[in-house]
Image (cartoon, coloured by chain):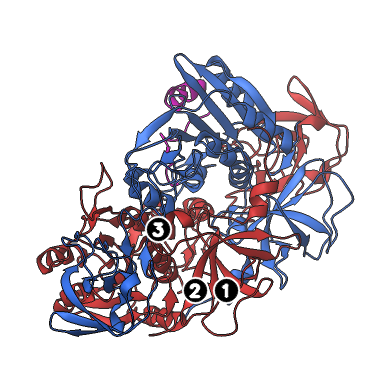
Chain colours: A blue, B red
Amino acid sequence: MITKGEALARIASALDYPLPTEFRPLHDALGAVLAADIRSDVDMPPFEKSSVDGWAISAEGHEPGRRYGILERIMAGTMPTRRLLAGQTSKVMTGAPLPEGANAVVMVEDGEEEAESVILRAKIRPGQNVCHRGEDLAAGQIVLAAGTRIDAVVLGVLAMVGADPVSVFAVPSVCVIPTGDELCLPEGPPPEGAQIRETNGVMLRAQVRGVSPILRAFSPGIARDNPESLRNFLDVGLDHDVLILSGGVSMGDLDLVGGALKERGLEVAIEKVAIKPGKPLLFGRVPRPHRPPAFVFGLPGNPVSSFVTFELFVFPFLRRLLGEPFEARPEEPATYAGTKSIARIPREQHLPCAIEVDATGALRANPLEWHGSADLRGLVAADGLMVVPSAGPALEPGMPVSVIRLPGHRPARARATHRGGGH
Amino acid sequence: MITKGEALARIASALDYPLPTEFRPLHDALGAVLAADIRSDVDMPPFEKSSVDGWAISAEGHEPGRRYGILERIMAGTMPTRRLLAGQTSKVMTGAPLPEGANAVVMVEDGEEEAESVILRAKIRPGQNVCHRGEDLAAGQIVLAAGTRIDAVVLGVLAMVGADPVSVFAVPSVCVIPTGDELCLPEGPPPEGAQIRETNGVMLRAQVRGVSPILRAFSPGIARDNPESLRNFLDVGLDHDVLILSGGVSMGDLDLVGGALKERGLEVAIEKVAIKPGKPLLFGRVPRPHRPPAFVFGLPGNPVSSFVTFELFVFPFLRRLLGEPFEARPEEPATYAGTKSIARIPREQHLPCAIEVDATGALRANPLEWHGSADLRGLVAADGLMVVPSAGPALEPGMPVSVIRLPGHRPARARATHRGGGH
């Protein structure tokens, strides 16, 4: 059995070819990763721009109280039509271009307008209340580097420089297939006998969406524990870039799923990892003619094991496939705030915990009541997983430990003390 | 001008009616909020279940080395057909139900199988390697409370108890409309003259998705600065539950957008907030016959102001409409780690900053170079916003300050020190 670190290294090194790229429209690019540096094709601002509503003048000839003739009124989105001469001004709105001959703007509240002239009472220096052409972005300049993940702000910058469509690393297609004769669909009461409702498909698809808003997972249904069903589902699943199977990898079943995958030429990289929950974990790739290989994760069927192994292993791999560095979910230092000592076992444990932040900003991890890897409800209230390595003496209250925060959860202090008004 | 806190209180109290609810299928419920408590309709496990591959026996009559006749083999997903008598065992796979007459399971590696019998070498106590019926969930028990946000784990639990479709607070429809004669579409070079590319529509729609994966914003295009265009776009926008306008709320333009909204009966709750960036901010509601009112946010047109006011004000309001408590983005204590003193102004400042975590877990805020509210690129590298209140002496290096983390960003320590193998 290999350690978590060794498993992560094998997963990271399985991707040994350059990632393909594609162009995507900006309205469908949130969460993808830039495949090339982006240069601006414009100066921003594109002209000398007023940063206030006011009166554009030449600062050099100005003194407070001077009267100016008004040439025109310039709105944002319109161009000045006339050049200022001495003693002349044009009214400019916020964001409007300055007319030729102007290099400063007196704020509108400092002017006293009368018919076609205005008395400007304020002092002014050249450049005051003016944004200079190219001050934020200069044409030709690199404004975003390859490898940048596209979030809301990056989308705005891409729009600003006209990068629509934009070149990104190709978004991988993902397929999720739960396996098992004991599984039935969630709708309606379970049929008589030993059937339990299938939970992992809908959960894993949500976890895939949690990796990036650009990712979706396809799910063709539940595969059954017989070679024909598995073959049919693998026909579908291996057409995707990443196939995530759940169940069928524990000792009793492995021959069936493993056998079906070996028929397709699976190159096995991982079979078991020394962690709890989640010991059985299959990872490898299936070569495909004229295409990159399909990557296959076989996760344990117990829901908590399936959830945890996804976050530990599949999450960083999908991020990497999207074009980001391979980076495991961060482990942050914390203090074990439970009351019982926790014995070490030969596997690294990952226990659902509540995370609190104390007054100094340090984290405290408090394990939750939990009945083991089938007890998915025990995970609902968890902020994260407390990591207990396999080596060393028992973990005692107050000892240092590390925690992995779960997506969508945040520590208790932020939740409890920063409410706005009402409700 | 009102403070940020007063603005948040007015936004929170604008929602004064019970939220409508709807049923959604689980595959389209991620990010919605439960409108009712969820009870389990099953026991989980649904039967006395083996937690290992092994031999089911009655522990009472057992001693190590005893030989048992093998009755049958029970897979997960099948029911036992025969009751054990003294000296009998059935082989059970992980997750399979125990046969009647059994109350413990000897692990498969502790048995020595020969033809139709097996010698079991291990000691065993009643209940060993057995998960009891109803141990994780009992039928009739409340397993998830109303108000719970649906994440991947909650989806799994909902599937487990058959809550598909599930009752949630109705997902609001959202419309984003940028306004301004100076705006052109991102595709292609901007036309001659004072045109700049429109950035806020695609950015705000991404911010709406960032509130919850269940939310989408519709965008019908760019409204122009004339009454007819605004009227046409309001026809579309006010048909949605929330209308987000960007631009057209600064002093020079307010009459136009405000006038068009007042024609529709806008009840104004907010016109200006004492913050920078973002002073002009319009919020109110437009009554609609036989429906809840439409809520309207008029955000400033400068991209950074638009981004910041969304995160400060629209974000908590959309969360509340989805069925969660009204809760502003948390402000966390930090130390000002810049080198220059920052003067107070009459408005509360929100400055883009990098956030570092020091060895004790405490946060350090370092403002980034930034040219003001049009400089969206200055926000790309920001982890968050440093909040400088309007009152008090100048902010000096080393003084306490607070920070608001931006979505999708995380502090430097986590990024730098927890990489997995490779790449």
Q: Please name the residue shown 44% across and 76% down the image.
A: B275
Real-space Cα separation, disc 2 to disc 1, in angstroms? 10 Å
Query: Looking at the figure, which quarter contains the C terminus of chain A?
Result: bottom left
CB-based contact (under 8 Å), mark 2 and mark 1: yes
Q: Badge 1, how many Cα within 10 Å: few under 14, some, many 20+?
A: few
> Which segment is the magenta one?
A213-237
| Residue underneath mark 1 | B342
**The residue under label 3 is which amino acid type?**
Gln
Chain at tag 2:
B
Quick one: A368 or A11, which is closer to the camera?
A11
Q: Nearer the viewer, mark 2 or mark 1?
A: 1
A390 in relation to A118, above or below: above
Would you say residue A232 sits in the magenta stretch? yes
| Residue underneath mark 2 | B349
Rendering coords of residue A362 (x, y %): 73, 65
Rendering coords of residue B193 (x, y %): 21, 53
Rendering coords of residue A267 (x, y %): 61, 19
Residue A212 can be seen in this image: yes
**The residue under label 1 is which amino acid type?**
Ile
Query: Looking at the figure, which quarter contains the N terminus of chain A?
Result: top right
Q: Please name the residue shown 78% across and 35% down the image.
A: B87
CB-based contact (under 8 Å), mark 3 and mark 1: no
